[in-house]
Amino acid sequence: MSITITQRQSFIAICALIGAGALIYGALSAFAGEWTRVIVSLISLLITALLLAAYLRGWEQARHVLVIVFVLLIVVGSVDVETVYRPNLLVPPALALVLLSPPWVIGTAITSVLLMGVRTGWSGPYLDVLNLLVYAVVVGLMLLARAILSTIARQAEAARQQAEEARVQAESLVESLAEANAAQQTQLEEQRRLLALVATLETPAIALADGVLFAPIVGHVDSRRASALMQRLLEAAHSERVHHVIIDISGVTTVDSMVAKAIVDTAQALKLLGCDVTLSGISSKVALTLTQQGIAISDVATVRSPQEALQRISAGG
């Protein structure tokens, strides 16, 4: 489980640890009768509380001041520095490692050693070569750990940015696909509308009088158009309660057995709906073709023109 800690949370946590440590250190020092350490602990607690309050009010420099103050407190408050070596000089670099930047880690480490050297007269265990070497190695490991963590953080941020870019691109692609799909649907609807219009123009059905439907056929008639003609006439006859349909083929260029059969089938289907059918516009060429192919249309009334068909319908009514 990964834990994300902000800079603000880190500072608050460090101040809490310092405060708790100062209280414990002061209490132990008081029991031991070491009042100098008690005073140093109280000063540390007071300064930490003041810096924490200032930081919470937005003063970012409180982090730097805390590190500098602890360099001074550790150097001044350390006891028996001439004879006893304690790893207390590692506290300022550790604080700088968490709160500040690598240059501050190096700076606090060097400053702590120099101030301790001034205090001890450049002698004692704090200036021992071996101790200084160990101190330098530990500080170096701190910097290495900071570099590794910074690299991991940069890689994680880069991965997060790449994931965010991929998410944005995916959302953009989804939006583009949705727009393209909407445009395609609109285009398909337009195509359907145009096809319906073409089908209507190919097989028009016009109401000439009450209950009389006129269907002029113009041009070449193939199987698809013949099927569309039958379907449209049947639908119109049923929906409009037509009792007579006039089919005019004067504009048909060629009439063969297929066309004739389609017309006969349409007429028979209309008769099943209770409609009379009249065929008009049969030319001499068409009549000759029908005769030669032996196609009988005796069940369908024939006239020379739609006007004649209307006259017969009127006379019959």
Image (cartoon, grey):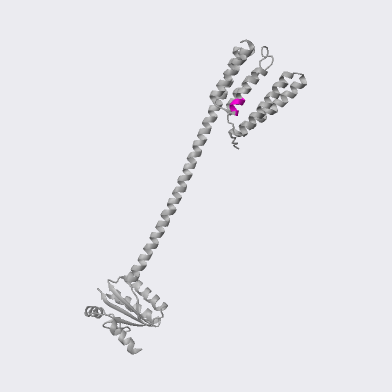
Q: Residue at x 53, y 30 (%)?
A: 150
Q: 142 or 238, which is in the foreground?
A: 142
Identify the image quadrant of the C terminus: bottom left
In the rendered image, residue 251, in percent from the top left (x then y), is placed at 26, 75
Instruction: State the image quarter where residue 250 is shown.
Output: bottom left
Q: Residue at x 40, y 60 (%)?
A: 186
In the rendered image, residue 155, in percent from the top left (x then y), is placed at 50, 34
In the rendered image, residue 6, in percent from the top left (x then y), is placed at 59, 35
Which residues, given as a range, are shown in magenta?
Answer: 62-66
Asked if one can make out residue 168 in the rendered structure from this viewpoint, the answer is yes
Q: Is residue 165 magenta?
A: no
Asked if one can make out residue 254 in the rendered structure from this viewpoint, the answer is no
Q: 204 or 253, which is in the foreground?
A: 204
Instruction: State the image quarter where residue 47 is shown.
Output: top right
In the rendered image, residue 311, in percent from the top left (x then y), is placed at 30, 86
Q: 221 or 162, which is in the foreground?
A: 162
- Specify whether 250 is left or right of 235: left
- Specify whether 244 is left or right of 91: left
